[in-house]
Image (cartoon, rainbow, N blue to C red):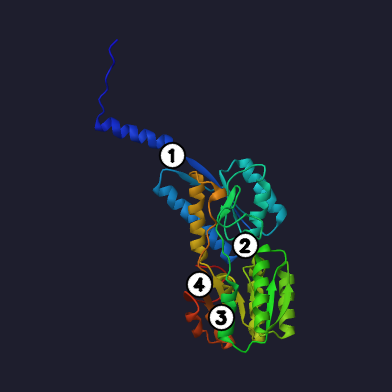
Amino acid sequence: MKKRLFTATAASVTAAMALSATVMAADYKVGIIQFVDDASLNQIEAAIEAQLTAKSEEGEDNYIFDGFVYNGQADSTMLSQITTQLLSDGVDVIVPIATPTAQIVQAATEDNPVPVVFSAVSDPVGAGLAESMEAPGSNITGTSDALNTNAILDLMFVANPDIKSVGLLYSQSEDASKQPIADAKAYLEEKGVEYVEKTGTNNTEVTQAADALIAAGVDAVFTPTDNTVMTAELGIYEKFIDAGIPHYAGADSFALNGAFCGYGVDYENLGTATADMVIEILQGADPAVTPVQTFDNGIATVNTETAEALGLDYSGFAEKCTAVVETVTAEEFE
């Protein structure tokens, strides 16, 4: 029997390539769970969506998140239910935003190893989410907004070298706040500066804690990247202004919501990088050996209205930061 020979034409090659691309293209379901509604986390979530949309439009694969985006409103029961729902929906990856969300998702996927790419986890190792930053060691990796606590406290003393007492305002329920608060205590003890700790687990308690710090007569207040305090900032910033106390915090959203200074990462950039990691994992990268990404903490955001009300000069910040950004009080980033 004679073998039949086929000659490839330009048209047949093009058709074959098109068929191959069609076969190789994939639709990926991306589940996104936001811890709570605040300016920073909203910015991250929007950036993740924008990047996944852009990559879907320019590439062959399609990253589907419509119908798979949730906000747990800081309720652990709700966050657990959302995670269960996403697993039932058969998502290909889960993206928890903020440490408490990532911890709940991690626990839920121990026996169902869906890849997890977290975002805005300040201390992944300390929170028990990763064995190390270089090799997380399981089905989970992501991006970290680790705070350089000493750097923001340096700014505090640039603005006022004569500080004698600092208030530490945070939530004990957030693992992300534990290490920065420990670092702040060590820093202040070395300088011989007193500190007063006050905590809260909801808006009412945070407001009461702020009142207690004012009553204690502290010269400045420090809050790390704490979502519980973040959600209360619009309700407490005027109290600090009226008392003449500058509030320094670990994210630009605090300054947007009225605090004197927020210091930390660019959250839009962090969200974009998170989406890129999601794509990398979906295309075959192993989360266990994919390093957690960290970012430069060199951006100070100053609320100019608050600075004027407090009579503070922040011109010296430029020498201590990669950049100084000015903002005015608003609820959300534009």
Check the image and report above or below for 15 versus 314.
above
**Residue hosting label 1:** 25
The residue that appears at 60% across and 44% down in the rendered structure is: 114
Which mark, by number, is residue 298? 4
Left of 235 or right of it: where is 255?
left
Between disc 1 and disc 2, whose residue precedes?
1
**Local SS, label 1:** loop
Q: Residues within 10 Å of mark 1 (few under 14, many from 20)?
A: few
Between disc 3 and disc 2, whose residue precedes?
2
Q: How many marks?
A: 4
The residue that appears at 55% across and 84% down in the rendered structure is: 158
Instruction: Tell us which disc is closer to us: 3 or 1.
Output: 3
Which mark, by number, is residue 155? 3
Residue 18's spot in the image, x, y percent? 35, 35
Residue 321's spot in the image, x, y percent? 49, 76
Q: Residue furthest top?
A: 1
Between disc 2 and disc 4, whose residue precedes?
2
Check the image and report above or below for 174 versus 236.
above
Residue 48's spot in the image, x, y percent? 51, 56
Q: Marks 3/1: CA distance? A: 50 Å
**Residue hosting label 2:** 123
**Local SS, label 3:** helix
Q: Residues within 10 Å of mark 3 (few under 14, many from 20)?
A: many
Q: Marks 4/3: CA distance? A: 11 Å
Instruction: Tell us which disc is closer to us: 1 or 4.
Output: 4
The residue that appears at 62% across and 82% down in the rendered structure is: 246
Q: Amino acid at mark 4?
A: Gly
Q: Marks 1/4: CA distance? A: 40 Å
